[in-house]
Amino acid sequence: MTKTAVAATAASVMAMTASMASADTWRYAFEEAIDEVQGVFAQKFKEEIEANSDHTVQLFPYGTLGESADTMEQAQAGILQFVDQSPGFTGSLIPEAQVFFVPYLLPQDTEELGEFFRTSKAINEMFPELYAEQGLELLVMFPEGEVCMTTQEPVSGPPDLNEVKFRVMTNPLLVESYKAFGATPTPLPWGEVYGALQTGIIQGQENPMFFIESTKMYEVTEVITCAGHNNFTTAVMANQDFYDGLSEDEQQMIDDAMDVAFEHIIDYQKGLHEESIEKIKAAKPEMQVNVLTEEERAPFIEAAADVEATFLEMTGESGAAILEQLKADLDAVTN
């Protein structure tokens, strides 16, 4: 979608909104398709709002209002009431949000992961202040599944990523992560990734397994490698002025709907990783799916220390405080 088309779409959406705080229709954009994890979360939120109020929620899946940068601009401008966007993209606005790209920080156990996002002081108390500085009300963060790499050749250690052009989000710390892993990180908008893999412009990318399956990344790569280095995190935000303009009852209704959608999406993801692998293998039996051993992961874990140091350099005292609190929150649910 061109910038002109995005602007025209945004203008038409704005024109439909007579009064943002009292709008009968609330607009919510996210970065995935309607039947993917963010879409399932959004549908549950919509269901809860419409069951408990006179409001309706209009959902805009990926691509309908442009790329991630476009929907964030529209949320900050108040054209959208809600936006779901990964800290990978908000990292340029909120550098501390890049902490979710420090490799091997988050646990692999899904129960521990859910409890961490549910109870983390860093997520629920510290991050909202940082988002508010950007005109955004942070409503919830939630995990979307273990991130795995897709490449043309098998990967059993950093040397196998040498000179591999690897697509990353436009996130400075993710770039540093793949440099540390030995690859050549190549930031690209998501809409260009399939074609770039198909033509050999890049040779790899990373995503949760459900997304690899639903976007058919397996069609243009040959090997999936799960190194246990991360779990994809996303965040749902409201335009701050919109949220502040609501009554306390409506704010509470939104918060409650987010809580219901959070529990729904945690439950929805149970077994989703494994189911997605089965679908990929059914569609492409020759696809290799490899899970690295502890020994094979060791060099990646060692490289992660350099990435953590880079994060602290990028974010200073604020980032250090966030990281320290996150580690304390993680320790509380894993020990």
Image (tube, rainbow, N blue to C red):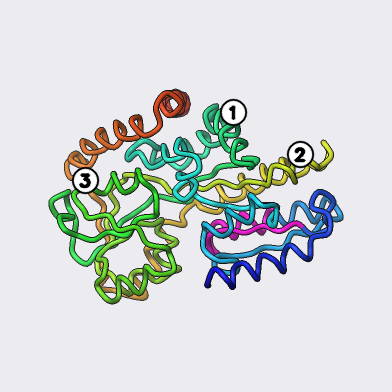
Marks 3 and 1, how far apart at CA: 36 Å
Image coords of residue 3 (percent x, y):
54, 68
Give coordinates of residue 322: x percent, y percent: 46, 28
In this picture, which residue range is highlighted in magenta? 26-45
Residue type at mark 2: give it.
Answer: Asp
Find disc 1 in the rendering and name its residue: 125
Q: In this view, does 133 lie above or below 192?
A: above
Question: Does 46 sit above or below residue 179?
Answer: below
| Residue at 66% from the left image edge and 65% from the top image edge | 10
Callout 1 secondary element? helix
Q: Position of residue 313 (x, y in %)?
A: 33, 31
Q: Circle 3 is placed at which residue position? A: 293
Q: Which of 274 and 52 is in front in this view?
A: 52
- Mark 3 or mark 1, whichever is nearer to me: 1
Q: Residue 307 sits in which quadrant?
A: top left
Inspect the image, locate mark 3, and give the three-letter code of the amino acid beneath it.
Thr
Image position, residue 277 (x, y; %): 37, 63
Specify whether residue 41 is painted magenta. yes
Q: Can residue 246 be spotted in the picture?
A: yes
Q: Which amino acid does label 1 sit on?
A: Glu
Q: Are marks 3 and 1 in contact (CB under 8 Å)?
A: no
Label 2 belongs to which residue? 244
Q: Which residue is drawn at 55% across and 28% down?
A: 126
